[in-house]
Amino acid sequence: MSTYDLHEGTVTTILIRGARILGGAPSDILLRDGVVADIGDLAGVRADQTVDADGLIALPGLVDLHTHLREPGREDAETVETGTQAAARGGYTAVHAMANTSPVADTAGVVEQVWRLGQEYGHCDVQPVGAVTSGLGGSQLAELGAMADSAARVRVFSDDGKCVSDAVLMRRALEYVKAFDGVVAQHAQEPRLTEGAQLNEGEVSARLGLIGWPAVAEEAIIARDCLLAAHVGSRLHVCHVSTAGSVEIIRWAKSKGWDVTAEVTPHHLLLTDSCAERSPLGPYNPIYKVNPPLRTAEDVRALREALADGTIDCVATDHAPHPVEDKETEWAAAAMGMIGLETALSVVQEAMVETGLLDWAGVADRMSARPAAIGRLAGHGRPVEPGAPGNLTLFDPSVRQPVDPAAMASKSRNTPYEGLTLPGRVVATFLRGRPTVLEGKLV
Ligand SMILES: [Zn+2]
């Protein structure tokens, strides 16, 4: 590797040697002036810097539709800076920052602030999500139009963390976002059916004596919202689908030709509610407490199949950082959520690639092209080909290593994979032709 100082701005061309694009035959990739300039056998080409990608897979830069960056308001858990560093380390070139900050991202002012911070740090693009209701209060629509027209150009609106449970408000939001090609991303959780809920309602919750979180609380809202979206001819995105029944409803809505998309988190593709009972970390460990809850092995199987057949469009991390004191407490008092940006690709390799359900082209589609399309991010999710923006990830699928929370860039440590051995490692990430990560380290 050359010794050019990347911060001096001297490097304008980078030659990536021998990368397997989407797992195909080795090929060289030339990045120049922010774009993919050439692909093929480029042995005679001179560049400012050369990156040896022997054995590495090249994917388009990953795009996350669902990240909690916590800034403004909970900078003790994560900041735009640390969250985007974690994203870059995970192979991401763009993340959608959820609106449940303090203050809530429900005005043009707040979304522009978050968007600008992302630009300033430059580790990865930050696309703010706007709140659907004012203050996430669930009673009055937020300034959706002003956020759409702002410098942040918001297209995804969500009260994530809370469900827009009022059917009239949900209908109005779906109608409103049509004016600017927006989408309402619903956190599907019927509030009355989940009062005090702690863990998936089933055998495990019964044995542990934890208040159950029934699948129907998610499925009822998804069914209602699919019908509403169809009724007003708008676009619905379903956040973190977690049950086999939800998959059936989304499959039905898509068969009708309705404009419904859905995401699944890495943890719902790998972990089950039995983790709360039996895990290397012991029973009742709140590291496994998450919203929606971990479900059964049968649900995991249905989610994997749905992601493989396209019923579920994409993987979204729901990266939810929490400080130690909010997680290391008794189960009922602990905060819900897990971090996920730095392990997402490895978990997807484990759950989807090693099981033969997806190849690397499929991974690129579900983790880059589809989420970019749903979020209307024109500069992301493009195939790695000449003329495309130089957003890409180099990944080594051949290594297996234990997950080490202490080595993560995120400010929080609440990963459920601690000590677990997962495949794959992000070696490099490029944002518009500039490396944000090289040799696994932040640039
Ligand atoms: Zn959510």
Image (spheres, rainbow, N blue to C red):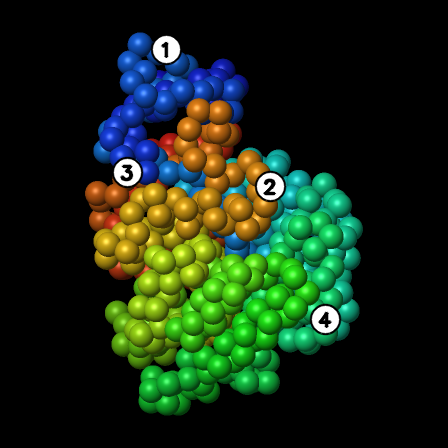
Q: Earlier in the sequence, mark 1 or mark 4?
A: 1
Residue 198: percent from left, percent from top: 46, 80
Q: Secondary structure at mark 2?
A: helix
Mark 1 and mark 4: Cα distance apart in space: 58 Å
Q: Which residue in the protein does label 3 denote?
A: 23
Type of residue at label 4? Leu
Kind of residue at badge 3:
Gly
Q: Secondary structure at mark 3?
A: loop
Q: How far apart are labels 3 and 4 at the CA level? A: 45 Å
Going from N to C along the chain, the mark reached first, 3 or 2, is 3
**Location of mark 2 (residue):** 118
Which residue is labeled 1 in the image?
46
Residue 61: horizontal and vertical position, in percent? Answer: 44, 39
Q: CA distance from mark 3 to mark 2?
A: 31 Å
Element at badge 1?
loop
Q: Amino acid at mark 1?
A: Arg
* Left-right relation of 189 to 150: left
**Disc 2 residue type (three-letter):** Gly
